[in-house]
């Protein structure tokens, strides 16, 4: 089979890059041909610039003089895709074959030529209501493919029924919604397309990679994420001074970049909530009030590593005692007790102990009884409303109280748990069975009134696309 992973352009890919790389690898391991296509909102793309960039990446000159907080950092060649990639920009793709400018007069032909012999397409993103998509009133034609080419849609967003409700206009073309976490799965209850929970897949080895005991791991805490508001990296950064205010010092490696990082570190545009204040941090030494939380964390030993390639991430996973995902979301709290980050799954594969947030009490929970992942994972669980000092106390107790024996038991338990829940090989076989027609255990939602309203508004008033869509193929 030929399988294409396609998406309309987005910003800030984050863990989605490694998720797709792992999906690709699982299908390659089963003997299938795989490739990636990105559809941009531009009129043209430069082959000359692409050739120059690839040359610089291959000879290493691309990295000369690069600051570690550059969004261009972390570039490495994908094992499965074969393309240069990083977690911010995604993949470096060749114009007109793998990178198609949709405003080019021949864009649709380029797309149809590329997927003419494709058996299965995994979509990840579709056009949304934004400045770049204005006037793009024929985007649905990219989904107008013959029945011989099946189309699955991978849902990464717990807001999918809000931000992409109009996917329901494609229900004649999209066979299933493949949801990578519980929030995504439950949000799609409001969309009348079959769906399944396929927890962010990873290629798992036979056993833990570099299985080191807790005492053998020299870094106490590691955390690396795209600095989006939901990730709450500021809450981790605020707790570091409370961890290291005493005689005992703990090591913190922090990686990532993006807009919130820029606001935290800017000399003249720092957001006020990224400055020390007693409302957010009532236990902080008052002499720091008004200073940037970033600067105070640096004073107390935070080691910032910038945007990291996967190879370096894996090195830190193998040598860190605990991996911290400080994120929480009031919206996601409708659906789960904690959101399993793809980076956290990578940490588990490498035998690193997870630190997660507990969303309990944040919202009226609809589906908590179904969050078996939260009930089974062995992790340090920090309440979403913990103060920075309370956050720090949880971390310090984890280092001091978990023995090597418990660490070994718990990390092996987590490995087996996620291997069963998130193994890319198992997921790939299941998806191939669905491709062959096995739909019995899929759940089908129902278009909510809000989804119907949003679909009509966006499709008719923004894209000027008449509903129902009249497909030709």
Image (tube, rainbow, N blue to C red):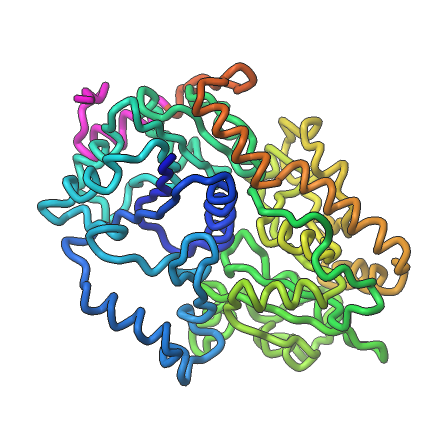
Q: Position of residue 430 (x, y in %)?
A: 54, 28
User: What residue occupies the far bottom of the structure in this picture?
Assistant: 65
Is 62 situated left or right of 297 in this image?
left
Residue 107 vs residue 68, the one in the foreground: 107
Asked whether residue 169 is in view, the answer is no
Asked whether residue 373 is in view, the answer is yes
Image height of 147 relative to 210, above or below: above
- Indicate whether residue 471 is drawn in magenta: yes
For residue 422, which quarter of the picture? top right
- Indicate whether residue 267 is drawn in magenta: no
Residue 59 vs residue 93, the one in the foreground: 59
Classify the position of the N terminus by image quarter: top left
Is 366 situated left or right of 196 in this image?
right
User: What residue occupies the far front of the structure in this picture?
Assistant: 31
Image height of 160 relative to 381, above or below: above
In percent of the image, x 52 and y 35: which residue is there? 428
Give, as a single range, the part of the protein colored magenta.
452-473
Is 213 situated left or right of 337 in this image?
right
Residue 384 vs residue 189, the one in the foreground: 189
Q: Position of residue 438 (x, y in %)?
A: 50, 18
Q: Position of residue 312 (x, y in %)?
A: 58, 68
In percent of the image, x 43 and y 25: which residue is there? 435
In percent of the image, x 27 and y 25: which residue is there? 456
Q: How many marks?
A: 0
Q: Position of residue 425 (x, y in %)?
A: 57, 39
For residue 352, which quarter of the picture? bottom right
Classify the position of the C terminus by image quarter: top left
Is 432 situated left or right of 146 in this image?
right
User: What residue occupies the far top of the structure in this picture?
Assistant: 440
């Amino acid at each position: 089979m030929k399988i294409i992973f396609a998406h309309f352009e987005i910003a800030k890919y984050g863990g989605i890059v490694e998720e797709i790389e792992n999906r690709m690898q699982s299908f390659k391991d089963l003997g299938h041909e795989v490739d990636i296509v990105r559809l941009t909102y531009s009129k043209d793309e430069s082959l000359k610039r692409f050739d120059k960039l690839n040359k610089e990446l291959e000879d290493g000159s691309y990295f000369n003089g690069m600051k570690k907080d550059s969004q261009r950092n972390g570039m490495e060649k994908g094992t499965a895709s074969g393309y240069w990639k990083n977690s911010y920009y995604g993949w470096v793709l060749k114009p007109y074959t793998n990178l198609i400018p949709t405003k080019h007069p021949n864009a649709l032909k380029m797309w149809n030529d590329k997927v003419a012999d494709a058996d299965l397409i995994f979509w990840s993103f579709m056009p949304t209501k934004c400045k770049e998509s204005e006037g793009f009133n024929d985007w649905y034609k990219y989904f107008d493919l013959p029945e011989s080419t099946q189309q699955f849609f991978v849902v990464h967003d717990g807001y999918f029924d809000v931000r992409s409700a109009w996917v329901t206009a494609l229900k004649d073309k999209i066979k299933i919604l493949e949801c990578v976490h519980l929030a995504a799965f439950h949000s799609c209850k409001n969309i009348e397309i079959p769906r399944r929970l396929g927890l962010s897949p990873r290629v798992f080895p036979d056993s833990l990679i570099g299985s080191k005991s807790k005492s053998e791991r020299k870094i106490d805490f590691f955390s690396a994420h795209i600095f989006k508001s939901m990730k709450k990296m500021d809450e981790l950064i605020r707790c570091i001074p409370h961890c290291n205010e005493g005689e005992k010092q703990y090591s913190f490696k922090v990686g990532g970049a993006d807009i919130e990082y820029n606001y935290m570190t800017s000399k003249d545009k720092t957001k006020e909530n990224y400055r020390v204040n007693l409302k957010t941090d009532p236990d902080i030494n008052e002499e720091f009030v008004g200073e940037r939380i970033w600067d105070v964390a640096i004073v107390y030993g935070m080691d910032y590593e910038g945007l990291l390639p996967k190879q370096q991430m894996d090195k830190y996973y193998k040598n860190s005692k605990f991996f911290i995902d400080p994120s929480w979301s009031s919206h996601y709290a409708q659906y789960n007790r904690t959101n399993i980050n793809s980076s956290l799954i990578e940490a588990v594969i490498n035998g690193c102990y997870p630190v997660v947030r507990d969303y309990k009490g944040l919202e009226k929970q609809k589906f908590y009884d179904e969050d078996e992942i939260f009930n089974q994972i062995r992790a340090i669980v920090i309440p979403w409303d913990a103060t920075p000092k309370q956050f720090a106390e949880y971390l310090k107790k984890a280092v001091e109280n978990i023995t090597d024996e418990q660490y070994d038991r718990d990390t092996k338990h987590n490995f087996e748990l996620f291997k069963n829940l998130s193994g890319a090989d198992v997921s790939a076989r299941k998806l191939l069975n669905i491709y062959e027609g096995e739909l019995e255990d899929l759940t089908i939602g129902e278009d909510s009134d809000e989804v119907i309203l949003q679909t009509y508004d966006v499709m008719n008033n923004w894209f000027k696309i008449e509903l129902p869509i009249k497909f030709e193929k």
